[in-house]
Amino acid sequence: AVWNQRLGTLTLSMPSGITMQKGRPYIFSFLLSNPTAAKSAVQVQYFLRQASSATTTFTGTLAPDRYSEPSFYAMNAGDAEPLKVYKQVLLTKDIGQSTPYPSATNTLTVSLVSTVDLNGNDGSTVSIFGLLGSQTVSTDSLALIDNENTGST
């Protein structure tokens, strides 16, 4: 297959000896990288030309998938439309605690799910603020608990 980014065109040529048989569905997939900014889905067209007949061509619009939910956290029907891209956000941003009692050791648990990778190699950071009133003294090495057992804290 030939991909032309500037034109947004994928061109497939039938390999020698292969026939796309009438009445039989053919399904294929390919990988593209989404843009970095949010955008609406695109309308995708097709053009099919039968090489053995100068007059046999088909053109039209491919039907977008408005019903499937992609296999990514918190997706909805319609999110499988081609090149529909949401803005960069935190899909989940929750915090809770283990105990409300005075002078008790309290485990605060934060849950975050991002729509983009946050990479320590590029200097990405997460700051949690507004935690005023704790009796814990300031430190540069507060221990984190790996609740998912990923080995990364």
Image (tube, rainbow, N blue to C red):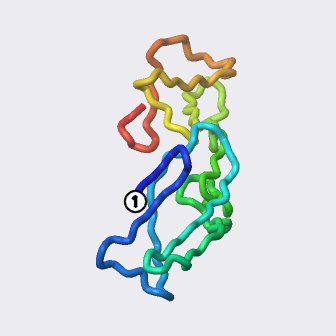
Horizontal side of residue 31 vs 130, given as left or right: left
Q: In terms of image quadrants, where is residue 13?
A: bottom left
In screen coordinates, is 84 left or right of 49? right
Q: Nearer the viewer, residue 88 or 11?
A: 11
**In this view, which residue lies farthest toward the left?**
17
Query: Residue drawn at (40%, 59%), measured in percent from left and top?
Result: 1
Q: Residue at x 51, y 76 (%)?
A: 54
Q: Where is residue 98 drawn, in percent x and y?
A: 59, 38
Q: Is residue 113 visible?
A: no
* Crowd class of label 1 (few under 14; some 14 to 19; many from 20; radius 10 Å): few
Secondary structure, mark 1, is loop
Q: Check disc 1 and report the residue beneath it.
A: 1
The amino acid at mark 1 is Ala
Furthest residue in direction front, as rendered: 54
Q: Residue at x 55, y 48 (%)?
A: 7
For residue 114, above or below residue 56: above
Name the residue at the bottom extreme: 23
> What is the number of callouts on the image?
1
Where's residue 104, x and y in %? 58, 28
Q: In the depicted view, which residue is nearer to us: 29 or 71?
A: 29
Q: Is residue 134 left or right of residue 51?
A: right
Name the residue: 57% across, 41% down. Answer: 35
The quarter of the picture where residue 153 lies is top left
Above/below status of 77 relative to 135: below
**Image coords of residue 74 (percent x, y):** 62, 53
User: As rendered, which of 29 and 117 lies closer to the eye?
Assistant: 29
Q: Is residue 102 visible?
A: yes
Position in image of residue 135 (x %, y %) = 60, 16
